Image (spheres, grey):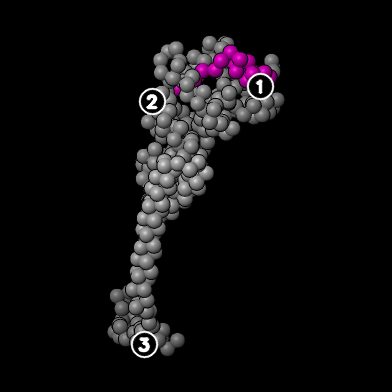
Amino acid sequence: MLHPARYFVRYLLVSLEDPSERSVNSTLRLHGVASLTKKEMARVSQELDVPGDLRLWDPTDAPTKRWLRKARVWSLVHPDDATREMKAQILEQPAVREKIDTLLMGNVSVSEASLRLQEQRIVVSVAALQEYRHYFWNTEGMGLSDWIEYFARDADEEEGSGRTHGRRSTLKSSLLGGPELAKYKAGIAQSIDGKKILSELQQELYFTFREIRTLPVSEKKVLMLSAITRSLTRLDERISSSDQALQDTLKRFEKFKIQNSPEKIPSLAQLAPTGSISSRSRTEILISREK
């Protein structure tokens, strides 16, 4: 399976003095991430192909720098402001991290996630969110089966329930429901378009109606078709009444017209014939009037 923290695993295999399965998995759990099997660990290590002459302590060593960038672990080996912010504002803030997990699972962009979190007085930059998504919650390429296996493993850790235990339902709903549902699950207030909801319900009922039509003739089929038909009729009436109310409102606004006033704006000379409080004398005002 794919692992959401696969690039963090790469970093551990490069940086740990003892990059054994036990050491790597212990560090993963310490960072709130599910462990890997021995087979998965071997595959990541083989793909990484760590050279023996790395100079991790030297950011100016060109071969090491090229390899770390190719492996996409440079910023953890040599942290920048975004990496430090990620650690302080996300990894060390469990409640914030849970919201971010939910938003990323629902495919909310990091730029929108940063904006929505600011609305809740949670300040996390786009760069820090990108770092977190890359190293710890990388949804790219993760399918539903990968997530189901990941959640199951996270709940069965030897040292107790994993970080996602108890939130699997929320995370799965966000994955399947998309950005709008993910934002709702993360507690982000949204404006709801009533007419759009009615239209979506109408569409859903219509295709359900099409599915029911394919069933063999039976008493149950007739009952289902009757219920769907009544619901569609009621929705159509609600949508039609909503459209009529909008048309009535627009007609009321037709009574209002914008007209230009025939009166001329008084000049400064008329308003202040003896001088103004802006220290302009009467002579200066008269000169400006002549111009």
Other-residue count near label 2 (Cα within 10 Å), few / some / many at <14 / 14–19 / ≥20: few
- Vertical side of 237 occupied by 174: above or below: above
Q: Secondary structure at mark 2?
A: loop
Return the x and y of residue 239 as percentages of the image width and height.
39, 59
Q: Which label's residue is closer to the chain start, 3 or 1? A: 1
Mark sitting earlier along the chain (3/2): 2
Question: Which of label 3 and label 1 is nearer to you?
Answer: 1
Residue under numbered circle 3: 262
Q: Which residue is mark 2?
A: 166
Q: Find the distance from the CA under tag 2 to the CA under tag 1.
A: 33 Å
Residue 77 at least partly seen: no
Question: In this picture, is 174 found above or below 164?
Answer: below
Residue 272 visible in the displayed image: yes
Q: Residues within 10 Å of mark 1 (few under 14, many from 20)?
A: some
Q: Is residue 11 on the magenta stretch? A: no
Which residue is label 1 attached to?
A: 48
The part of the chain drawn in magenta is 32-49
SS class, disc 3? loop
Give the residue at x 41% y 41%.
Answer: 220
Q: Amino acid at mark 3?
A: Pro
Identify the residue shown where x is 37% and y is 31%.
95
Q: What kind of residue is marked 1?
A: Leu
